[in-house]
Image: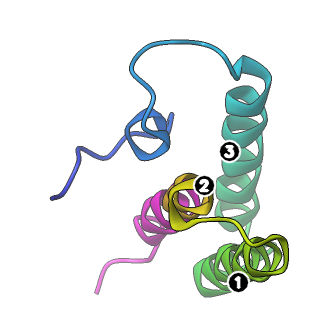
Amino acid sequence: MSEPTSNDNEAAAGRTGRHEDAPGQAAILLVEGLIHCLIAKSVISVEEAIEIVASASEVKDDIATDRGETPLVYQAPRTILESIAASLAFDRPPG
C-alpha cells in the first residue's frame, strides 16, 4: 500500500514516466520547495504548512463534489496533496 516517498510526487500522481503534464509537475515542485523554504526560514511553522495543504485538499474535495467528479478523477490531486503533507512533516524538529 505504501509507495516510496518522492519529492517529485510521480508515484502519488500515478504517472509512469510520461510527461503529459510537465508544467503542472514543475508548478507542484516549485510550490512544495517554496513551502519548505518558508519553513526553514521560520516564516511559517510546519504545522501551519500542513494546515495549508489540508485546506487545499478540503477545497479540492468541495470542488469535486460540486462538479460531481468521481473518486477516480479527484483522488490523484488529493494523493499529491497528501504526499506533500507527508514530505512537510519531515521538517518537524526532532523530539
Eyeballing the image, is 65 above or below 27?
Answer: below
Secondary structure state at the residue bearing disc 3: helix
Find disc 1 in the rendering and name its residue: 58
83 in magenta: yes
* N-terminal-most mark, 3 or 1: 3
* N-terminal-most mark, 2 or 3: 3
Eyeballing the image, is 55 above or below 74?
Answer: below
Quadrant of the frame with the N terminus:
bottom left
Q: Nearer the viewer, mark 2 or mark 1?
A: 2
Q: Nearer the viewer, residue 68 or 1?
A: 68
Give the left or right position of residue 48, taking residue 14 as reference. right
Find disc 3 in the rendering and name its residue: 33
Magenta extent: 80-95
CA–CA distance in space, label 2 to label 3: 26 Å
Give the left or right position of residue 92, taking residue 49 as reference. left
CA–CA distance in space, label 2 to label 1: 15 Å
User: In the image, residue 60 lies at what x, y percent?
Assistant: 74, 71
Find disc 2 in the rendering and name its residue: 73
User: In the image, residue 95 lies at what x, y percent?
Assistant: 28, 87
Check disc 2 and give the amino acid type. Val
